[in-house]
Amino acid sequence: MSLVSKPKVTVILANLGTPDEPTVPAVRQFLKEFLSDTRVIEIPKFLWQIILRMFILPFRPKRVSQAYASVWSKDSPMREIMFRQVNHLKEQIVGQYPEFELKIIPAMTYGNPGMVACLKEMQSQPQDHVVLLPLYPQYSATSTAPQYDLLSKWMLKQRNLPGLSIIKDYYQHPLYIKALAESVRRYWKNHGIAEKLLMSFHGIPQPYADKGDPYADRCRITAKLVAKELQLNDDAWAISFQSRFGKQEWVKPYTDVLLEEWGKKGVKSVQIMSPAFSADCLETLEELAMENAETFKEAGGESYAYIPALNTDELHLELFETLIQSQLDALKISLAQ
């Protein structure tokens, strides 16, 4: 009987979250959790809770639940895709590291499977090391940081702490840029090339960027690298930011405003993609693919097409494998010393 036990290692793939179902009660519960995070909304908490409970939660869930219903299949697209991503990584990675008792699990910051519940489960089987891979290509205090927060709160209550590795982001990783560019090339091969390629990223309030959130700058770097990889002229592509909420200024240019301007100026064809998302979700399948198509066409545009997120694209999964393997290989070396 060996006296040496295998180190217990858990890799967490974590995305933002989704309601449990496309109904008003489920969406209201999800929005309450999401919009109560002070990382997401920086308005003083007491004031914001009054606004949230009196003016947003009574009304917004009806419209949002209808939007979710328009993209829902058996489950939320984001959750379905994340499960497929995790299953693939299990098959490809776990067998490569027999020296570890290795698990790869999915988690959501908000909703299910909840990251808090995943962390609580670890208490029954304390882990020697945890690797967190936030599924956000570009770090932001509004998206990635809440996962740091959940880990920190959990660790404050633990006596037997694991080692911890966090992959902050991968906005300029060569495999990520290559995967994005290849997805565009495949689309062009099947559908032709539009006048404009628009890379639309989820937005953040401009004051957040002014205070030091690097997200918008990271998005711009991603877009420039993809355009360079595709050898696009400056007038053939643009970057924009979508999904603004409330009346304050957000980082610009705004996706819907830019599409309307293009339509009015005589641009006839646009292809749009969103390199901020690792999985298709409400913001891509409903907002980008449907809502913004109407905006462009009503302004005079003719052809509008959405290029899907990378999802379970081969190069995308290879990127995740590479990121995770780098952490596990480093852990192997440190344990061998």
Image (cartoon, rainbow, N blue to C red):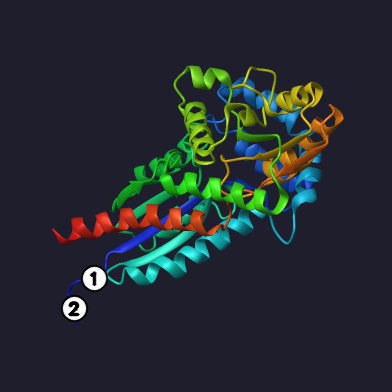
Q: Is residue 168 left or right of residue 226?
A: left
Q: Secondary structure at mark 2?
A: loop
Determine crowd level at label 2: few under 14, some 14-19, many 20+ residues with C-alpha closer than 10 A.
few
Residue at the spot 51% in from the left edge and 61% down from the top edge: 86
Q: Residue 5 has which mark? A: 1
- The residue indicated by pointer 2 is 2
Would you say the residues marked 1 and 2 are in contact, meaning their CB atoms lie under 8 Å apart?
yes
Estimate the x, y position of residue 140 in percent, counting from the top left. 49, 33
Distance, label 1 to label 2, CA atoms, is: 7 Å
Side of 200 where 90 appears, left or right: left
Residue ID at (54%, 41%): 230
Q: Amino acid at mark 1?
A: Ser
- The front one of 199 and 48 is 199
Counting from the top left corner in percent of width and height, residue 183 is at 59, 50
* Closest to the observer, 64 or 174: 174
Asked if residue 283 lies left or right of residue 293, the reply is left
Q: Secondary structure at mark 1?
A: loop
Among all residues in the image, which is located at the extreme left? 337
Q: x and y percent of residue 232 in the render?
A: 57, 35
The picture quadrant where one finds residue 127 is: bottom left
Q: Residues within 10 Å of mark 1 (few under 14, many from 20)?
A: few
Q: Residue 162 appears at what percent x and percent y?
A: 30, 53
Instruction: Tell me where residue 77 sits by quadrant.
Output: bottom right
Q: Amino acid at mark 2?
A: Ser
Q: Quick one: quadrant of the N terminus?
A: bottom left
Q: Is residue 54 visible?
A: no
Locate residue 277: give its quadrant: top right
Q: Residue at x 35, y 54 (%)?
A: 130
**Which mark, by number, is residue 334?**
none
